[in-house]
Image: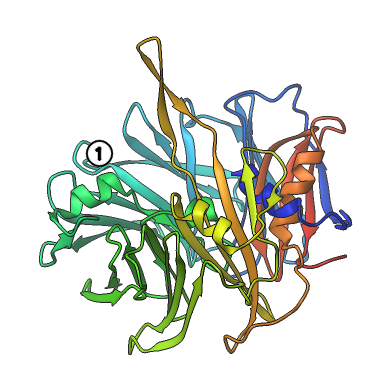
Amino acid sequence: MRKVFLFLAVLYNSILLSQTVLTSYPLDLKRVRENDQILNFENNSTHEVFVFVLSQGNFTILKYNSALFLNDQFTGPATYFNDRSLMGYSFSEDGNPTLYWFSEEAKNIIIVKYYFESKTSKALKFEYPNATHPIVTQYQKDNTFNFLTQHKTEPKLILYVFKNGIVEEKILDFSPFTFMNKKTQPQTFNQILAENPIEKMEPGEYNPLSMTISKTKMYLLSDRILLTLDQNLQRTQLFDINLNNLEIKEKNFVQPVAKKAPRTANSYYHENKLYQINANEEELSFDIKDLDSQQVLKSIAVAKNDTILFKNSPLLIQRDNYSPKELKNTAKFLQHLSGLDMGISVFKNKKNLFITIGGISKTTNQSFEGFYYPDIETKTVFFESIWDKKLGFTTERQQPLAIDKIYLFMDKHKEMALESIMKFKDYSILGYFDTTTKQYMMLKFTDGYN
């Protein structure tokens, strides 16, 4: 994912890479091994921060208070973790963390709760029907751990919610609904997901184009999940899933109407609004609709001979990891965009909306002497736009987000290993092991210029 952010970061040649060292801790890691892991995470109720370090057959958990002062730690042998990867975490009402370890080979999950008071742990094994329910995604929400699976033969998603040592199974049944492919031909729910796997959008964070070009996106709300399907160029099919009573409501949002049929289209949900966009070689069409009423709040059409008045950056094209280059005009931009997987991303800070519009090429197979090899060369075109919260255009200067600065910092510091990023209060924390100083570091990054 790093290079996706880099093409944003290279725009900010004047970024001062100043950052605040929040805390450091000496770690006796002789060398970083393949199975070593470090994860930092927050208890959303107490705002304590935990750092979990797994290395050389042992684990260490560092516990920081909300001011990021170390106030407890827990060390022991890594008894349960052989050949397992850390899926996620949750917190019990007593404030102690629970970690979830998945085995691809065993197809089960080891659940380990750590008791800081007694410096002991307790492990359980969770078996689920992995043969028929492959995992789609996993996430933490309100101190619970959740993972979503898909039924292989039935149009169902199964959500498992872990809280306070109890797991709840929630079956999301899509059998009452009908689905169509790109050519408006009938297709099953499972066929749609096989061709367009679900991509989970990170709530409250900037989701890059590499994620938002997905045709099937999942958004986490308070007691709901929104699932949007954009494989059909004519509409966005949206499912509003109530996690309390498991009721699923369908809404269909017609794509903006253009003079010529679109070649690429997508949507993005943000704060009860659906942002829909499509393009061909002649025109870019963009609508913003209220989720409840489906009323059009703003509609924009840009022809190839027009100037895109709401852009706050040049029209840019980037190939692989090379620096972006500016495209001369809208026609050139649309010519490239219409052949790519299109996406739009919307992110809000305290003042403005930051909108990214663009597309990324698909991976294709190249033939050489009878063998096929994936062509991993990528092409990306995009531009940035800054709006006020009333959906008005601005002429503000583009400023880097904290995540842009983090990835630029990571690219310049080769001594870093086992990196993890977390959102905390109104800033972001980069945690990593410094292979030179043998310390675990946590650095603070904020949006905007320093």
Circle 1 sits in a helix, a strand or a loop, which is it? loop
Residue 7 visible at all: yes
Q: Residue at x 44, y 55 (%)?
A: 338
Q: Which residue is mark 1?
A: 130
Q: Residue furthest front?
A: 305
Q: Residue at x 37, y 30 (%)?
A: 104
Total marks in image: 1
Quadrant the N terminus occupies:
top right
User: Quick one: 416 or 63, which is closer to the camera?
Assistant: 416
User: Quick one: 349 or 66, which is closer to the camera?
Assistant: 349
Q: Quadrant of residue 185?
A: bottom left
> Residue 417: x and y, percent?
72, 34
Q: Amino acid at mark 1?
A: Asn
Q: Quadrant of residue 160?
A: bottom left
Quadrant the C terminus occupies:
bottom right
> Residue 139: x and y, percent?
45, 55
Label 1 crowd (10 A; few <14 / some 14-19 / many >=20): some
Q: Is residue 220 left or right of residue 136?
A: right
Residue 39 visible at all: no
User: Quick one: 179 or 257, which is closer to the camera?
Assistant: 257
> Residue 398: x and y, percent?
75, 68
